Amino acid sequence: MTQTRRLPSVEFILLVALLNAMTAMSIDTMLPAIGTIATELRAADSNSRQYIVTAFFAGMALGTLVYGPGSDAIGRKPAIGVGLVFFAVGSLICLFAVNFPMLIIGRLVQGFGASAPRIVSIAMVRDGQAGAAMARVMSLVMMVFMLVPMLAPSIGQLVLAVSSWRMIFLGFLITGLIAGLWLWLRQEETLPPEKRLSLSPAALLAAAGEVLRHPVAMGYTFASGLVFGSFIIYLGTSQQIFAEQYGQGAYFALWFALFAAGIAMAMLVNARLVMRYGMRRLSGLALRGLVALSSAFLVYCLLAGGHPPLWALAAFLLISFFCSGLLFGNFNAIAMEPMGRIAGMAAAISGSLSSLIAILTGGVIGQMYDGTVIPLVAGFAVLGLLALLVTKWADRPRR
């Protein structure tokens, strides 16, 4: 095997964190601006602004299915490069959008491109690390990554304060160019030609069939999609709820950072406890807690006419996102546990399917927003309960 030049570990971690963070950046930076965009581009109604978020996720769901197996065949750097080209094209479409449908098309293309650095950068880590070493690198990557959802809405608000929302998309374009140049000039290819796989429809169909037939992989993929669906409801309606319903437009970025901190805390807690208590026990407790909290808070919201005090809503979301932070990583790991032989393709299929479930459930419930928080809280309760039932089905004893 030929020796390849390796980046210093700190630089490699920062590069992978940037490639991962492009997804969160492309969503969270937009949130303070989606109301302005929808008004300026004459969206059909106030809830149509949510499509700015869901269209991006739809593009990601499709791209995940393409770039995961594709990188096994053509190499990591070319796959990420193709994705960054699509990301740049989508950013340009949004930058020069003259109507709302054109912007949604741009977001779809942007999401399709952003899935490449998100998925393939993790494969780059896997190529050079294994076991505890890979876990350490990914933990450090996620620590850097979590700064993005905490800071991105503030950046979006700052851009709106001094310029047009279109400059946000110009920022996306510049970030994509920086990431692409950094990757191409500094990082060597991590998957040598002799280790690449042939990409065939038969192999993809065989992997899909194996995932779809396995109850644990299928059950936890569905559960992950349902939990992520509640997160999409929040992303789609957060600007309407905090900026309009509660008049917190000036402080929107601070609220968003607070709830992102809840997820970050959960990831740190999970990293410390998962080896002692196991993935299923931790995620089971978190999911039951999420369902109980959401159900109780839904009753409270109904009694309050859909307008609970802001402090109560904030406490609910902070605890809910803490529970969700314990679920995301564990559910994905449990779903992939029996898929070792076809991990690459199975990860792409599982990720794409869970994203599709999240878009269909979270997108539909988000469109029910009626000026109250009842659809949001009911979505957390219903989707959490469905996830609990699905995981129970997946873990039941079988002959």
Image (cartoon, rainbow, N blue to C red):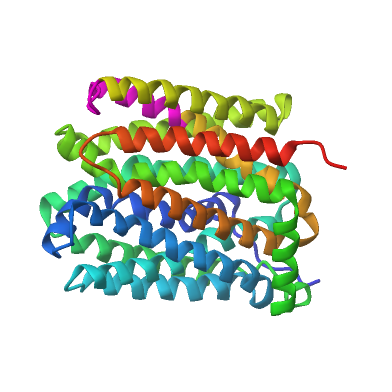
In-image side of 395 versus 45 (left or right) = right
In-image side of 225 versus 164 (left or right) = right
Q: Quadrant of the N terminus?
A: bottom right
Query: Which one is nearer the viewer's eye here, 178 or 292?
Result: 292
Q: Quadrant of the C terminus?
A: top right
Q: Is residue 369 magenta?
A: no
From the viewer's perspective, is residue 321 above or below residue 175?
above
Query: Which one is nearer the viewer's eye here, 178 or 393?
Result: 393
From the viewer's perspective, is residue 394 above or below residue 56?
above
In-image side of 329 versus 397 (left or right) = left
The chief SS type of the magenta part is: helix
Residue 372 in the image: state x and y as whole percent.
23, 34
Residue appearing at x 42%, y 58% in the figure? 57
Residue 362 in the image: state x and y as whole percent.
41, 48
Total labels: the figure holds: 0
Among the 4 quarters of the image, the one containing residue 76: bottom right
Q: Which residues are magenta?
A: 304-321
Can residue 127 be seen here?
no
Residue appearing at x 28%, y 41% in the figure? 238
Query: Which one is nearer the viewer's eye here, 212 or 2?
Result: 212
In-image side of 82 versus 233 (left or right) = right
Can residue 367 be seen here?
yes
